[in-house]
Each structure stands twice: as structure tokens, then as C-alpha cells.
Amino acid sequence: MENKNDFQYPHTFILLGASGDLARKKIYPTIWYLYRDNLLPKHTKFIGYARTKQTLSEVKEKCKKYLKVRPGDEEKLDEFWAANEYFAGSYDKRIDYEMLNQLINKFEKGPVANRIFYLAVPPTVFQDVTVNIRNACVSIKGFTRVIIEKPFGSDDVSSDALSNHLAGLFKEEQIYRIDHYLGKEMVQNLMTIRFANQIFKPSWNRENIASVLISFKEPFGTEGRGGYFDDFGIIRDVMQNHLLQILSLVAMEKPVTLNPNDIRDEKVKVLRHINPIELSDILVGQYVGNPEGKGDEKLGYLEDPTVPKDSVTPTYALAALNINNARWQGVPFILRCGKALNERKAEVRIQYKDVPGDIFDGHAKRNELVIRVQPGEALYLKLMSKSPGMKFDLVETELDLTYSMRYGEADVPDAYERLILDVFTGTQMHFVRNDELKEAWRIFTPVLKELEGKHIKPVPYVYGSRGPPQADDKLAEYNFKYSGSYKWKKPTLS
Ligand SMILES: NC(=O)C1=CN([C@@H]2O[C@H](COP(=O)(O)OP(=O)(O)OC[C@H]3O[C@@H](n4cnc5c(N)ncnc54)[C@H](OP(=O)(O)O)[C@@H]3O)[C@@H](O)[C@H]2O)C=CC1
Ligand SMILES: O=C1O[C@H](COP(=O)(O)O)[C@@H](O)[C@H](O)[C@H]1O
């Protein structure tokens, strides 16, 4: 029997919503990089599909500024565009998908041919598109895989409805739900750090760890495009998906094997130990303009013309989750995310407990293992050492694995590149399974309903600040101690 995953067979990558922002800024560039680096099957055809009537040259022109082209790649780029087609059709008419099917058929020579559909379309047309793919476009001589992007619903009920809809059309192994944080280098590294190093194993538990802080910070606000964001808010946009995914990788038990389903079984299991978040365990914020800032920084969220003037949508949130199992009971997992803050940063901080039986007059600070996801991938362990020299003082220092120092500026592939390639090879390890999603909504829906139902006003914070000042009090409340005394001596390349 043939292995249908085999790269020798023709593959067609169909990008629905090809005229949109995501397609232009992210998906076309990604498939170009994969093509440029010869990572895709040799006979791959790309078809852009959207309602807009335009030529392929117009698509090419609109994508131009987002596609990085190195000197010498020009010929390859021409080859890439020659492998592309654009087809204008509606999202809701089966006849258009039948024509799309005919177009795909033209390229599918031989006994096996595979199809991948990427849905870069708004949730409003999601149902029509998936039904029409199922009815008119599935491959009859190879695999059909469907890549979908969040939002996967906006609460437990709508997400279940979507999952049931998809389950009626495709098998779970055909559905690739993207959470692009699962494609990031350091997020993928979490499993290796945890399970390929004996040194961490004995201390990765409630006996040794005081708290875990998982942060996402962005230095820009909605920049006049808050209309979409306002329906979701930062909890649905970042916390319920990206940060919760990271939490499950930090907290899960060791999977039986590296098989994607074994890993996802463990992720689901740890999520099942988490109770829904209580209102008292969440702090929400909304940015206000900074009169001293530049340009957009002067404008608060409510001054974005696309945002309702009385919006209580959070642009910042901090929540503490408790995992009620033998490993973690009593250790707060703090998820913290916000827009319009002072920096771009995503990281995990595993903060160890104070050393018991102190003989250093309180000078020993807590150890912290920091996994820096971005920018500048790094893993560093903050620890105490004797200050070099005659004195017997303590000094805070670190064991530092900074990727740029250790591996040069070398290739850390973009998250989307890895994930799209995974779809071609058929590995679902870094994609969200239906039951993970269900657990995520179980944890977040009640508090979202309460925040929205009670119209709870977020606390203000200034654009460009670290967030609401109350957030630091919350950190202290959840046993995250900030000493403020650690200084990093940035290493220099020799
Ligand atoms: N390999 C590498 O790249 C390494 C880099 N470093 C860098 O050195 C610097 C310091 O290291 P880091 O571990 O962050 O050291 P610190 O423990 O000093 O933490 C600094 C961070 O703490 C947060 N903070 C500031 N004030 C408070 C407060 N009152 N309460 C709670 N938290 C507060 C801020 O982050 P926030 O606003 O997010 O709360 C701040 O960035 C960082 O820039 C780090 O990236 C250090 C070691 C290795
Ligand atoms: O999913 C999302 O992520 C981006 C941040 O992604 P990153 O890879 O640049 O960290 C965020 O801006 C966006 O609001 C959110 O929907």
C-alpha cells in the first residue's frame, strides 16, 4: 500500500481567504520560505481562493512587501509564483467549489494526490466554507487536511458547536487547529528541557516551586483596528489559548511516548485538574493614553474610533490558576498578558521556593528558571553564588543559554513555517486537539460570562507602562517574589 504522506506525490495547498490580511502578511510569505528552502513536496501547487476578483499578478503585488527575498533568490521566487494560481469564488456557493475542484484536478497526475486547505477566513463564513470543501473538494485519491485558525468559538457553547460541526465533516486526524505559539522554538523546547534533563525532574513540583509566571507583553495597542479585538478581548485573544497551551506543557506529566496523541492526552489530563477561574482570581485592565507618549501612545483603547466608547473589554489580564493534582496543588500558575505595554516579551518564569534553614541572613534570593520565548530565545537559571574574591558575600548570577550566543543568529524557523510543514508531513503534535479546546473553554467561560454579564470595568493602565500597578500586588499575593536586585551582565561575543 502506498504511503500517502510520501513527498513524491502531487500536493495542492489551497489558501481560502487569499485576499485577506493573514494570507498576505503571513501565509504567502510562509509558503514562499518553505518552497524556497525546498522543504515542500516537489510537485506542490498553490491555489489562492477568495471572493475578490483579481489576477495572480495582483496577488503577487500585494504580497510583495511581506515576502523576504535574499539576493540570488529571484529565480526561485519566479518559480514559486509560477506554481501559484488564483481563483475567485464565493464562500457559500457549491458551484464555485466544484469549479475549484476541477482546477485542482488538473494538477493531480498519477494514482495519489493530496490536498491541504488553509482557512484564512473570518468565522462568519467558516461553516459554509467547510461544508463546501467537504461536499465538492475532498481528495478522492489522497489525504485531505484542513488547517483552521482561531477563534475556535467564543465560549464553551459556541466552541462545542464548531467542534461538532467539524466532526460531522472531517475526522479529527484531518483537522489541524493552529495555535501558533505551539510552533515557537522555546515552546517546543519545553518538553525537551523537562523530559531530557534529569536535573529538573526531582524539583519540578510543589515541594520546590513557589509559583510559575507565564507572560505575554506587546508594546502596541489596537492602532485603529480595535473593532475585531473588542468582541474578544485579551483573555480570548491570548490567555485562553497561547498561555494556557504553554501552561499545559510546563505542568503536564511525562507522556508515554512522543506520539502526538500521547502528548495531547497528558495536556488534557493536566487541564482537567484545573477548576474554572474565579472572578477573585483575575485582574483585568484597559489602557489609557499616555499624554507624554508619541503618536498612537497618546491614545487610549477607548479613543480607538472602532471601539465602542463604553467598552469594558480587557486589553490586559492577570489570572492565577490552581492545578489540583499531587504535583502542583498550592502552586499558583499565573497567566499575564497585555497590549500597549512597555515591551515585547513572552516568557515562562519558574520561581523556586526560598531556601529553608537559611544560614545567609536572608541574602539568598529565590532561584528562577526563565524560558524566554521571544524576543531573543534564551533559557537562564538565576542562582546564588559566592562573590568572586576574598569576601564571602552572596551574589545573584545565572547559568545562561542565550541562543544568539550559543548558536549564532542561526535559523530559528518561524512558527508558521514549522506548523505548515507539519501539516504536509501529517504530524499533529503541535496542534490543538478537540478535547484540549473543550477543557480550555471550561476553565475560562464562567469568568468571561461574569466579567461581561456584570460589565466589570477594567482598571486603567498607561500606554507604554508595565500594566496596572495592582498587578504587582497580585503577583506578590500569588507567591511570586520580585527582589529587584538581580543585574544581568550581558555577555559579549568574542
Ligand atoms: N540570556 C538572556 O537573554 C538573559 C537576559 N537577561 C536579561 O536581564 C534582565 C533582567 O533579568 P530578569 O530575570 O528579568 O531579572 P529581574 O528578576 O530583575 O526581573 C526583571 C523583570 O521583573 C519585572 N518587574 C519589574 N518590577 C517589578 C515589580 N515591582 N514586581 C514584580 N515584577 C517586576 C519586570 O518584568 P515585567 O514587566 O514583565 O513584570 C522586569 O523586566 C532582563 O532584561 C533579562 O532579559 C538575564 C539573563 C539572561
Ligand atoms: O494570536 C495572536 O498573537 C499575536 C502575537 O503573536 P506573536 O507571534 O507576534 O507573539 C497577537 O498580536 C494577536 O493579538 C493575537 O491574536
Image (cartoon, helix red, strand yellow):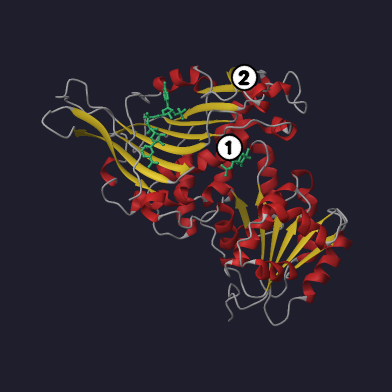
Find residue 279 and report its image quarter: top right
Label 2 – label 1 distance at C-alpha = 24 Å
Q: Which of marks 2 and 1 is nearer the N terminus?
A: 1
Residue 334 appears left or right of 15: left
Classify mark 1: helix, strand or loop: helix
Mark seen at residue 294 = none
- Is 380 or 146 nearer to us in this picture? 380
Residue plotted at (67% across, 27% down):
296
Q: What element carries label 2?
A: loop
Residue that mark 2 sits on: 290
Q: Position of residue 237 (x, y in %)?
A: 62, 36
* Residue type indicated by callout 2: Asn
Identify the residue under disc 1.
238
The location of residue 10, given as percent across then percent down, is 67, 75
Instruction: Note whether 164 is above or below 59 in the view shown.
Output: above
Asked if ligand 2 lies within 8 A of label 1, the reply is: yes
Foreground of the two, 299 or 446: 299
Residue 179 position within the rendered picture, expressed as x and y whole percent measured from the top left: 58, 47
Residue 137 in sight here: yes
Q: Quadrant of the N terminus?
A: bottom right
> Is the residue 483 above or below the residue 397 in the image?
above
The amino acid sitting under disc 1 is Val
Total marks shown come to: 2
Q: Please, is residue 136 above or below residue 454 in the view? A: below
Q: Can residue 23 be seen in this view?
A: no
Indicate left or right for 268 with 488 as reference.
right
Crowding at dot 1, Cα within 10 Å, few <14 / some 14-19 / many 20+, comes out as: many
* Nearer the camera: disc 2 or disc 1: 2
Q: Write down the quadrant of residue 153 in the picture.
A: top right
Instruction: Identify the residue at image location x=40%, y=53%.
Output: 255
